[in-house]
Amino acid sequence: MFNSNAGKIFFLFLFFLLFLFTKNSSSQKIFNLVGDWEGENKSYSLEKGSRSWKKKITIFEQNERIFKGNFKYADGETNFIGVIRSNNKSFYWVSAESKGYINGEILNKRTIEVCYVEAYKNAAVGCAILKREK
């Protein structure tokens, strides 16, 4: 059926496919956002004008692409839920206490950018570069 050369070529082909499969599956590892992230938030709202303040968020749970966290600010604390997109770079989060949403991007292992957008009467925008603290 198979001569020895054909068998060797077939075996090498299977080995090559296995290598490609392993490489592709490891490159799709989902980024772990769990931890504390800090940085300076710069924002503008129709109600409060320009502001800048230290922002600290904590992401305390992640199951595959879905995550949960909270952040503290002068007026209290807000919990949020989010999702990492399949490109493993972009993410979004929303909060029951907020009318807007966060659009984020993973810049590297220790740095993310988060931007808030809220429309309508209390329109507001803002962005922060956050560094992983732990």
Image: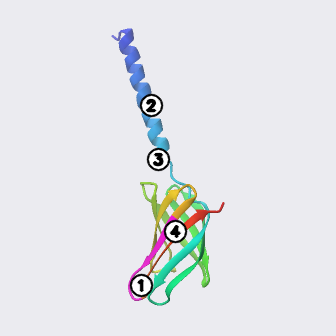
Residue situated in front as seen by the camera: 64 or 109: 109
Q: In this rendering, is residue 77 above or below 10? A: below
Q: In this rendering, is residue 75 above or below 60? A: below
User: Which marked residue is nearer to the observer: mark 4 or mark 1?
Assistant: 1
Residue on which disc 2 sits: 18
| SS state under label 2 | helix
Residue on which disc 3 sits: 28
Question: Where does residue 74 sit, x and y in percent of width and height?
Answer: 62, 83
CA distance separating discs 1 and 3: 37 Å
Residue sitting at x 47%, y 65%: 104
Q: In which quadrant is the C terminus drawn? A: bottom right
CA distance separating discs 2 and 3: 16 Å
CA distance separating discs 3 and 4: 22 Å
- Residue range in magenta is 113-121
The amino acid type of the residue labelled 1 equals: Ala
Chief SS of the magenta region: strand
Residue on which disc 4 sits: 81
Question: Where does residue 12 sit, x and y in percent of width and height?
Answer: 42, 21
Question: Where does residue 62 sit, x and y in percent of width and height?
Answer: 56, 59
Mark 1 or mark 3, which has the lower sequence index?
3
Residue on which disc 1 sits: 123
Mark 3 or mark 4, which has the lower sequence index?
3
| SS state under label 3 | loop
Mark 4 or mark 1, which has the lower sequence index?
4
CA distance separating discs 1 and 2: 52 Å
Mark 2 or mark 3, which has the lower sequence index?
2
Residue at the right extreme, as displayed: 134
Mark 1 or mark 2, which has the lower sequence index?
2
Q: Quadrant of residue 1?
A: top left
Q: In this rendering, is residue 4 above or below 83? A: above
